[in-house]
Amino acid sequence: MEAVTKMVSERPVVIFSKNSCCMSHSIKTLLCDFGVNPAVYELDEMQRGREIEQALLRLGCNPSVPAVFIGGEFVGGANEVMSLHLKRSLIPMLKRVGALWV
């Protein structure tokens, strides 16, 4: 769990993902299309990916991917990120943490 906390504190936007997850791909595409440069950790490519996935589940990330952190805080998965976007709350949140400048 400490590793996850350290990872999410290093960048304004962090996504825990798996290459095989279509929802992870959708969220990465959405944020990158906005101009965000998130730190993306592909759990299925990492040596300690399974351990990190278990830590994400303990933090309440269910399903474990995609898990999106903005400003060091857990925002949620694909449903939560899309809901924020549809409510027009996502871009202001990204601006607040310095992930977007426009």
Image: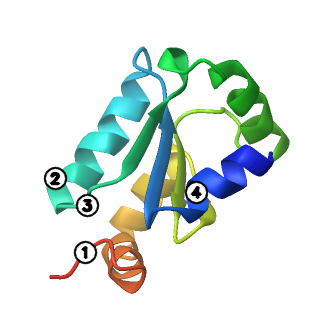
Circle 4: is it few (<14), some (14-19), or many (20+) Cα within 10 Å? many
Horizontal arrangement in the rendering, residue 34 relative to residue 13 (left or right): left
Residue that badge 3 annotates? 36
- Residue at (55% x, 25% y) in the render: 43
Residue placed most toward the observer, 86 or 26 = 26
> Coloring scheme of the render?
rainbow
Residue that badge 1 annotates? 100
Residue placed most toward the observer, 90 or 68 = 68
Q: Please report whichever mark, 1 or 2, sits nearer to the chain's N-terminal start.
A: 2
The x, y position of residue 55, in whole percent, is 78, 37
The x, y position of residue 98, in whole percent, is 34, 79
- Residue at (36% x, 43% y) in the render: 27
Q: Give the label on residue 33, or none.
A: 2
Circle 3: is it few (<14), some (14-19), or many (20+) Cα within 10 Å? many
The x, y position of residue 21, in whole percent, is 44, 21
Identify the amino acid type marked 1.
Leu
What distance separates the C-alpha of mark 4 from that of mark 3? 15 Å
Which is more foreground, mark 4 or mark 3? 4
Would you say the residues marked 2 and 3 are in contact, meaning their CB atoms lie under 8 Å apart?
Answer: no
Is 45 drawn above or below residue 11 in the view shown? above
Residue that badge 4 annotates? 8
Horizontal arrangement in the rendering, residue 21 relative to residue 49 (left or right): left
Identify the amino acid type marked 2.
Asp
Residue placed most toward the observer, 87 or 60 = 60
The x, y position of residue 18, in whole percent, is 47, 23
Identify the amino acid type marked 3.
Val
